[in-house]
Image: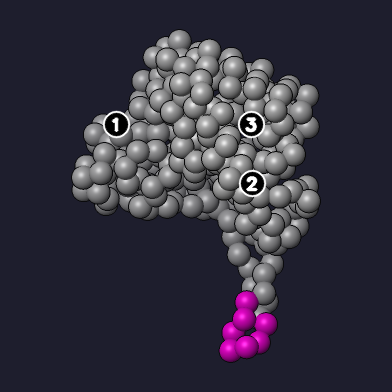
Amino acid sequence: MVTIFDIKRFAVHDGPGIRTTVFLKGCPLRCWWCHNPESQAREPVTIDIERKVNGRSVAGKKTYGEQMETGAIIETLLRDRHFYEESGGGVTFSGGEPLMQSSELVELLEASKLNGLHTAVDTSGFAKREQFERILGTTDLFLYDLKHMDPELHKKYTGVDNGLIHANADYLIENGASLIFRIPVIPEVNTSREEVARMIAFLKERKESITEVHLLPYHRIAENKYFRLRMKQQMHEAKEPDQTFLELLKKEFEKSGLEVVIGG
Ligand code: SF4
């Protein structure tokens, strides 16, 4: 059984073409800016909510997460096979960190490939090497996060060191994997001149193996979720980056010959 918290059909930002994205529950990181805090716990979470019914508040419950058989997930994915074929799309396994359910992810990827689907894995990179080894042959594309280059600040903002993440990226590159690096753009967290220069240097060194770089602007959309989940919100003062800043940042990355997309 796989614990998921969402399946999004007709996704257009999680890899090429039209895709279905399966969000697996559980993540070893605790990023301050996480848009999906409901994804972090490995098990389903139930919270108390209030619903408006005929103008009156009614107490209720909402559960984030459910268990599904691999076969049922594949069946759902295959419903849109026609759209994948027409658009050059496929399926993306995201999270949370999908490698938290490593054996289940292996099964899902193998079944997807047996059905001829293009596969992508959206990962924080924070997983054991052998877990990446097991999915290398069945993953057509990795969407790989790059959050902060400074190990101490990476640990402060995500809860984990970035050494393993960089080492796994190099392992994937050395073994011929296709990678899109995804950078969350968060003013006052990872947009200083020095930090941007360090990210560019990291990517430039690996340029030949990188398909694209996606700059993902921070949004404050998740604030209400933190409140409802009774989780600590650490990004009170954070600003969203404006379009002018994003365009300038894009140009800065492009100077190194990288293919850059805002959003992605
Ligand atoms: S890696 Fe992604 S899912 Fe995990 S805490 Fe960070 S932003 Fe959230």
Q: Secondary structure at mark 3?
A: loop
Q: Secondary structure at mark 1?
A: helix
- State which tag comes first along the sequence, 1 or 2: 1
**Spot occupied by residue 187 in the image (x, y as percentages of width and height):** 70, 41
For image coordinates 50% across by 15% down, the residue present is 206
The residue beneath circle 1 is 113
Label 1 or label 3, whichever lies nearer to me, is 3
The colour scheme applied to this rendered structure is one colour
Q: Nearer the viewer, residue 248 or 55?
A: 248
Q: Give the magenta range.
A: 51-57
Find the distance from the CA under tag 2 to the CA under tag 3. Answer: 15 Å
How crowded pointer 3 is (Cα within 10 Å; few <14, some 14-19, many 20+) is rated as: many
**Spot occupied by residue 195 in the image (x, y as percentages of width and height):** 69, 26
> In the image, is residue 53 part of the stretch drawn in magenta?
yes
How crowded pointer 1 is (Cα within 10 Å; few <14, some 14-19, many 20+) is rated as: some
The residue beneath circle 2 is 241
How crowded pointer 2 is (Cα within 10 Å; few <14, some 14-19, many 20+) is rated as: some
- State which tag comes first along the sequence, 2 or 3: 3
Give the residue type that dot 1 points to.
Answer: Lys
Find the distance from the CA under tag 1 to the CA under tag 3. Answer: 30 Å
Image-quadrant location for residue 177: top left
Q: What is the magenta segment's predominant secondary structure?
A: strand
Instruction: Determine whether label 1 and label 2 are within 8 Å by CB.
Output: no
Tell me, yes or no, if residue 260 can be seen here.
yes
Mark 3 CB lies closer than 8 A to ligand 1:
yes
Instruction: Determine whether label 2 and label 3 are within 8 Å by CB.
Output: no
